């Protein structure tokens, strides 16, 4: 089933082989309620605890591709959720710092990440404010829909670093990549449209 999902993603997008390998090798059913076990390797989003979702594998691959992850990258993930995207980043060799506002999700993700043998530093808090004490980051990935690009997150990027974030209203968002090109200079690129759960916080909804 994992191989079939990997082949489906190859047909849908021009993703790096390492990303396809990560999705093929990470057991997605660990991150879902047992009721969805047989559907875990379909290219669909599913509900998880606390009214949140685990992203569609295509969306995970898409955001990861835009990040251009390199081994050793220090990456901040906003919205740990069940930890699936966290594990994809870790599989690719990133040093992952992930923040989630819901303690129950953080505890669940922490256990799954441990069972699968990955390593990530998990935090509970307002993701829109990032982790200033741990900044700067090579890359930042936001896995929820933002009304604006949070200024705090932009300021926590290294020069040359990327911030990938879906921006729009609560119904539809456009994927955006911000590149920090100087101390106070940023370049914005826009990509395809997606639907994410809202980003809650001081610089979110």
Image (tube, rainbow, N blue to C red):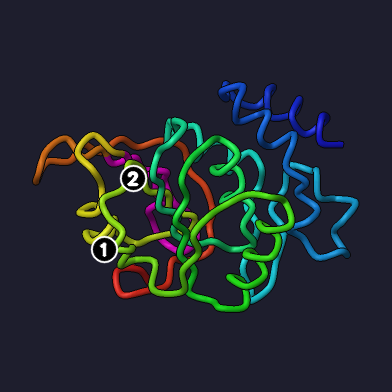
Q: Does the stretch in magenta take in 174?
A: yes
Q: Which residue is depicted at the point 64% across and 64% down?
A: 109
Q: Which residue is depicted at the point 28% across and 38% down?
A: 161
> Looking at the figure, which quarter contains the N terminus?
top right
Instruction: In the rendered structure, find residue 132 and report the number of the disc placed on it.
Output: 1
In the depicted structure, whether residue 59 falls above or below residue 170: above
Q: CA distance from mark 1 to mark 2?
A: 15 Å
Task: Where is residue 21? Give x, y as percent.
Answer: 68, 29
Q: Label 1 crowding class (10 Å Cα cut-off): few <14, some 14-19, many 20+?
A: few
Task: Where is residue 68? Give x, y as percent.
Answer: 43, 30
Q: Secondary structure at mark 1?
A: helix
Report the span colored magenta: 162-178
Q: Which residue is depicted at the point 67% across and 58% down?
A: 114
**Nearer to me, 46 or 29:** 29
In the depicted structure, whether residue 88 falls above or below residue 38: above
Residue marked by disc 2: 163
Task: Where is residue 125? Give x, y as percent.
Answer: 41, 74
In this figure, what is the number of numbered marks?
2
Q: Which residue is depicted at the point 60% across and 31% down?
A: 19
Q: Is residue 148 left or right of residue 167?
A: left
**Majority secondary structure of the magenta segment?**
strand
Mark found first going from the N terminus, 1 or 2: 1
């Amino acid at each position: 089933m994992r191989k079939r999902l990997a082949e489906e993603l190859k047909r849908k997008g021009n993703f790096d082989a390492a990303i396809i390998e990560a999705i093929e090798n990470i057991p997605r059913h660990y991150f879902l309620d047992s009721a969805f076990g047989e559907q875990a390797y379909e290219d669909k989003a599913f509900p998880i605890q606390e009214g949140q979702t685990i992203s569609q594998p295509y969306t995970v691959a898409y955001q990861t591709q835009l990040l251009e992850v390199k081994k050793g990258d220090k990456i901040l993930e906003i919205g740990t959720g069940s930890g699936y995207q966290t594990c994809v980043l870790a599989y690719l060799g990133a040093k992952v710092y992930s923040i989630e506002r819901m303690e129950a999700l953080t505890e669940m993700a922490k256990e799954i990440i441990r069972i699968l043998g990955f390593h990530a530093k998990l935090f509970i808090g307002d993701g829109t404010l990032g982790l200033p004490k741990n900044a700067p980051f090579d890359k930042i990935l936001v896995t929820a829909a933002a009304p604006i690009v949070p200024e705090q997150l932009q300021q926590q990027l290294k020069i040359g670093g990327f911030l990938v974030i879906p921006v729009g209203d609560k119904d539809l968002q456009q994927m955006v990549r911000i590149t920090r090109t100087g101390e106070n200079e940023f370049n914005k690129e826009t990509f395809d449209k997606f639907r994410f759960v809202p980003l809650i916080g001081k610089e979110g909804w």
